[in-house]
Image (cartoon, helix red, strand yellow):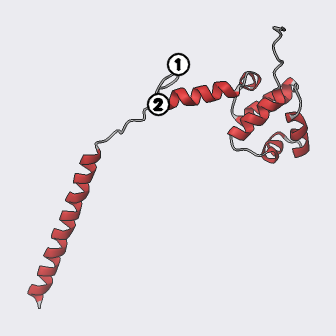
Amino acid sequence: MSTATKPKHIGRNISRIRELRGMKQEALAIAIGVSQQYISTLEGSETVETEKLNSIAEVLGVSAEAIENFSDEAVLNNIQNNHEGSVIHSGPTLNHNCTFNPIDKIVELYERLVQAEKDKVEYLERLMKEK
C-alpha cells in the first residue's frame, strides 16, 4: 500500500472556487485578459504558472495559497460548522440570533395602526362639523 499523497490539481481547484463564486469561465478570462478556451484548458491542468495563479487568485478574491490548498471537504466542514454556530477559525463569530424582540415590533405596528385610525376618525369628525 502506497503512502504517497495525491498531487494537488490546481486547475480543478480554480474551477471549484470560480463556481463557488458564481463566476463563469468567460468572466474570469476577460478579467485576466485571456480567452475562455485558455481558462478551460487551464482548469484541466494540474499545475499553473505562479504569475497566472496570482492574477486568478486576485480576481477570485482569494490568495494563491487558498487555491493551492483548496479542498471540497474543508469547505463543507466550514459551512456545516458555521451553520451550527461553531467557529473553526479565529475570525468573527456569526450571530444567527434576532437583534430585536419580535413582540416589540408587533406592538409598535399595532400602535401605529391605532394612531392612524384615530387620525382618520378625527379628520372625518372635522369634515362632519364643517357641513
Which residue is tagged 1? 90
Task: Check disc 2 and give the amino acid type.
Answer: Leu
Labelled pair 2, 1 in contact (Cβ < 8 Å): no
| Image spot of residue 91 (x, y percent) | 52, 23
For the question of whether residue 59 can be seen, the reply is no
For the question of whether residue 77 can be seen, the reply is yes
Q: Residue 108, relative to residue 70: is it above or below?
A: below
| Image spot of residue 32 (x, y percent) | 82, 39
Circle on res. 94: 2
> Which of the pair 59/6 is nearer the observer?
6
Q: Residue 7, relative to residue 98: is it above or below?
A: above
Q: Quadrant of the N terminus?
A: top right
| Image spot of residue 49 (x, y percent) | 88, 25
Secondary structure beneath dot 1 equals: loop
Q: Quadrant of the C terminus?
A: bottom left
Most extreme residue toward the left is 129
Q: Is residue 110 left or right of residue 30?
A: left
Please tell me which residue is depicted at 11% across the width and 88% down the height of the picture. Answer: 130
